[in-house]
Image (cartoon, rainbow, N blue to C red):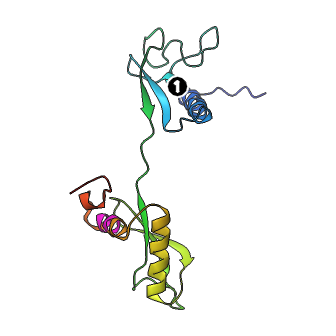
Amino acid sequence: MSDEKITLEENIQERADYIRRYFISIGMPHLVDENCSCGHKRSEHADTLFNYDGHGRCLRCDCDQFTYKSFVEAAPAPRMAFFVMETNMNSQGEYNALIAVENESGYYKTDWLWGKDFKKAQEIADERNFRMGLSRKEAAMIQCSTMRQVKMPEADPDNEN
């Protein structure tokens, strides 16, 4: 057993990990923590004598007891789309698969090679995007959003305009 002292931040991180695992175990992975009326999270509260994880005093302020206010939900991951560019290929002329992340400047280059035929490479990108629930238009708008750095409402499937 180690005599190393655990820092407050490490302690809170362990508590937060425990709480996230709890929400996953009960089938609610979109929830990651709970807010207290003091403004801090349950993971920032100590255990009580009766081992109610994170329901004791706040480790950051003078709050005596965790008082539930609301859940903390995980931020949704940004959408991404595969694409190919006619100017982005390896020395053998094979097209690299590229990834655009919505509203993030630039793109990511993968080590996947999708052949020497641009049309077939584009079909592979379209098929991969379709499997992720993206139409060709949505994928193109995600790709465009990486250039403009502006949320493009046309790329939002819930937008009826």
Residue 9 vertical placement versus 156 (above, below)? above
**Along the horizontal axis of the image, is 110 left or right of 37?**
right
**Along the horizontal axis of the image, is 146 left or right of 81?**
left
Where does residue 70 sit, x and y in percent of width and height? 41, 24
**Along the horizontal axis of the image, is 101 left or right of 51?**
left
Residue at image x 64%, y 13%?
Answer: 51
Residue at image x 24%, y 55%?
Answer: 160
In magenta stretch: residue 101: no
| Circle 1 residues within 10 Å: few <14, some 14–19, many ≥20 | many
Can you identify the residue that label 1 sits on?
A: 43
Magenta stretch in the rendered image? 141-146
Q: Residue furthest left?
A: 161
Instruction: State whether the magenta stretch is mostly helix, strand or loop.
Output: helix
Q: Quadrant of residue 37?
A: top left
In magenta stretch: residue 143: yes
Residue 131 visible in the current orientation = yes
Q: Amino acid at mark 1?
A: Ser
**Quadrant in which the N terminus is drawn:** top right
Residue at image x 54%, y 28%?
Answer: 12
